[in-house]
Image (tube, coloured by chain):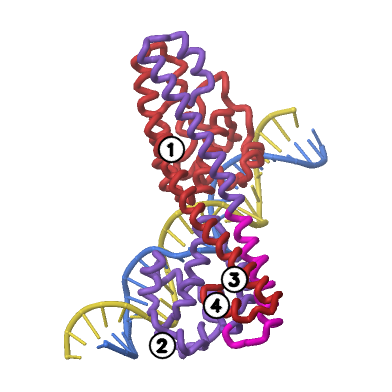
Chain colours: A purple, B red, C yellow, D blue
Amino acid sequence: MSSNTETAGRFRIGEVADQLGVTTRTIRYYEERGLLNHGTKRPKGSHRLYAQTDVVRLQELIRLRDLLGLSLEDLVELAEAEEARACLRGRWDNTTDDEERMRIVDEAIPLVEKQLRLVTSRQQTLASFSDELRSKLKLMKQVRRDLAARDTSAVAARSASDC
Amino acid sequence: MSSNTETAGRFRIGEVADQLGVTTRTIRYYEERGLLNHGTKRPKGSHRLYAQTDVVRLQELIRLRDLLGLSLEDLVELAEAEEARACLRGRWDNTTDDEERMRIVDEAIPLVEKQLRLVTSRQQTLASFSDELRSKLKLMKQVRRDLAARDTSAVAARSASDC
DNA sequence: TTGCTCCTCACGTCACGTGAGGTGGC
DNA sequence: TTGCTCCTCACGTCACGTGAGGTGGC
């Protein structure tokens, strides 16, 4: 996955799974589907080893999946775009060409902006849901107070919009 | 589903599905799993008909599923608890007993509070994710400006924490 | 050498998707 | 009567879960 020798292969699949709160099966499945391991061809049967950058990358994908409910197909799309950033493959560190670096940053920025838009949209939906629940709760507590005060007419006035 | 004659049976499954943005299969599946149709025994082969209260109820379940990523098992649990509210079955409207109404409200309040806790927790997670994306973006734009100004030393100072 | 974790099939499951073939109401 | 939507199987799919049986490194 990482071709960068200095960061290569320090974590085993079980450690990564524990860190991210998923199972090893999930990680292997993501590899099957092409989200990981674009770099090294691992000899069949040998252990998978992950670099810190790989873990961070997986972390991001899993967070997008959990928080936004994206399908693996969506994740593949985002991952491929992120691939273009190439930071993970060391293109950034291996070049001293400012124009090359400019291109990398220019590719990366719209991607993060897209993720931010997705997150912001989801935040708004949740905020209105939250508001709804709050006013529902407020109403119910008011009805409760009316009942406690044996004020039947007040209860009747409110009950229509309750529940 | 609804045994309340005045609100019974005005929507067909296709209409409900369109309103909620799901397929008819989803609604039938939820019925299979016991989330719906606790009331009427429909003659086999006959059309399903839903009341407005049924649609609202389904809407809530689907929103919880989408926004919080709850499993159907989780939804069944919440639905069963909500069943206790009994408003949908007309217990509220069919009683004039204040103590009965008090019991209904007392059962309903902690349920909505629980939903609110789930939503709030999700909001916090999303907020920190959003913050992370924002500062990442800010840093990348700064690097871009440094590159544009051909200020190589400034770029180098920042690149370590980039990507 | 003994555990432990890893490996690869491969079948099971959850939450639906997607027809196949047929019936029912405006 | 003609469409349209509905019905019930029932098999397919996506994203994994869960062993079965075996190998590899501290």
Residue A126, position as x, y percentages in the image:
54, 44
The answer to whether residue A111 is above or below residue C16 is below
Left of B149 or right of it: where is B139?
A: left
Which residue is labeled 4 in the image? B157
Q: Taken as a whole, is the magenta stretch helix, strand or loop?
A: helix
Query: Disc 4 versus disc 3: distance between alpha carbons?
Result: 27 Å
Q: Choose between B13 and B77: the one closer to the eye.
A: B77
Query: Disc 2 versus disc 1: distance between alpha carbons?
Result: 47 Å
| Quarter of the image that includes the C terminus of chain B | bottom right
Residue B152, position as x, y percentages in the image:
63, 81
- Mark 3 vs mark 2: give the one in front: 3
Rendered image quadrant of residue B11:
top right
The answer to whether residue B146 is above or below residue B39 is below
Chain identifier of the residue bearing label 4 in the image: B
Q: Label 4 sits on what residue type? A: Ala
Q: Is residue A104 magenta?
A: yes
Q: Label 2 sits on what residue type? A: Ser
Chain identifier of the residue bearing label 1 in the image: B
Please tell me if label 4 and label 3 are on a single chain.
no
Which residue is labeled 2 in the image? A46
Which residue is labeled 3 in the image? A79
Secondary structure of the residue carrying numbered label 1: helix
- Other residues around mark 3 within 10 Å, as few (<14) / some (14–19) / many (≥20): many
Chain identifier of the residue bearing label 3 in the image: A
